[in-house]
Image (tube, rainbow, N blue to C red):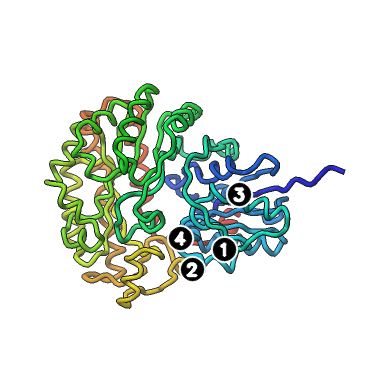
Amino acid sequence: MAEHRMKILFVLPGIGKKKGEKYLRSWLMEPLTVAVLSKLTPPQYDRLFLDDRIETIDEDTPCDVVAITVETYTAKRAYELAERFRRKGKIVVMGGYHVTLCPGDAAAHADVLITGNAESVWADALADIARGNFQPLYHGVACPDYGLPDRSIYADKMKKYLPISLIEIGRGCTRKCEFCSIASYYGGRYRHRPIEDIVAEIKTCGHGIFFFVDDSIFSDKSFAKALFTEIAKLRIVWVTQITLDVAGDGELLRLMRESGCTLVLIGFESIDAGNLRQMNKEWNDRLGARDTLVERIHGAGINIYASFVFGFDHDCEQSFADVLDFSMRHRFFVVAFNHLLCFPGTKTYETFRSEGRLLHERWWLREDYDYGQISFAPALVSPDGLRALCGKYKRRYFTFRSIFRRFPVLCARTKKPILHLAYWVMNIMFHFEVDRRIGIPVGENLDEAKK
């Protein structure tokens, strides 16, 4: 008789979608976390992956262990899926940012919790499960030298994801913005992967655009410069997330551009000094004239995806109007008008809770919670008013007139046809998704919605 091989089923929960509509295309990125976990799984175990965003999750899928990565927005759906598998006798393992920052929230829905990073404990946890003497909690530390992710785990689903290869350069961020879950998760520290592994991984990916998923790739600038020098040899196009202070380093900007960087996401968050102080990001205001810094980045031939967060104590409708004017003046590639999210485990969440401003402490589990709903009491506008303003100014930035007005400036910054195409795809997609995003039920039973 053949020996039983324990089978691991990786499940990525979806956020939700409106009835009769497809899952939002802009959310369908490669699930890099799953590929990393698959790489970390010892070869004696079989592996399978189901993506809740694009396929039905069947709790009768043959497996022994179900591994679910949980984010705050997907927690409700993750718990519902976990209970379905547990009723079938499967051992459920949960990990991810939400589990680490809010373990008490997830404990009732899993047999095993993994907090922190999985690299140092994943194989041990699986071995314990196979022996039948596993622990309820494993805590791992960041060891991002795992080699190359195993993208074969979702190869059969690749055609449904956006044609962008996600690459992890490192983890963490040295900044400590009070609203940011990454700052809480990593405690202001940054750890990077070996450059040779990053280069080798890029060579295995077939897409024309790469997204370096770091929250702040420039936390170690000497490492970043060495990395870009090597990446320049590959002749790729890549995008990433940065902080505005990169504009002060001319050599770094040059190396970025020469290595193929054409677009960066910058979390401006706010252009109001009072708001920046409240979120512990006043250093952003001390860098110098904001317009000059933006022009330096644009002058290097790099476009900007500008992200703003509204709901801090100095925000009113004039704040939105000022940001729209700032954004149109610089002809940003795209702009995000986001409302503040009070993620559990962050200082902002604890401050608002102590001030009695949280409308719902566990907003992510509410039956009637939907995408765009405000979970706290803003100082100068109502919750519904804040939600409406976010939608109003998103629509204004993504009108067809705005899209056409901004395109000639893009052409002057970069001659790469692939980025011109990306501009039209992203802007048109955002134009149509502004209203589709608002009101999406978070944690909805996606299997019912797929019928």
Q: Which residue does the numbered mark 2 point to in the structure image?
A: 365
Mark 4 neighbour density, 10 Å: few (under 14) some (14–19) many (20 or more): many
| Label 3: element kind | strand
| Front residue of this view, candidates 260 and 286 | 286
Which x, y percent locates residue 250?
19, 33
Amino acid carrying mark 1 in the image: Tyr
Please say if 40 is above or below 283.
above
Task: First in sequence, mark 2 or 1: give its number.
Answer: 1
Task: First in sequence, mark 4 or 1: give its number.
Answer: 4
Residue shown at the point (64%, 54%) measured from the top left: 66
Amino acid carrying mark 4 in the image: Thr
- The N terminus lies in quadrant: top right
Residue shown at the point (40%, 32%) measured from the top left: 209
Mark 2 neighbour density, 10 Å: few (under 14) some (14–19) many (20 or more): some
Q: Which residue does the numbered mark 4 point to in the structure image?
A: 72
Residue shown at the point (35%, 40%) measured from the top left: 426
Task: First in sequence, mark 2 or 4: give its number.
Answer: 4
Tell me, yes or no, whether the two marked residues, 2 and 1, touch with CB atoms within 8 Å: yes
| Front residue of this view, candidates 59 and 195 | 195
Task: First in sequence, mark 3 or 1: give its number.
Answer: 3
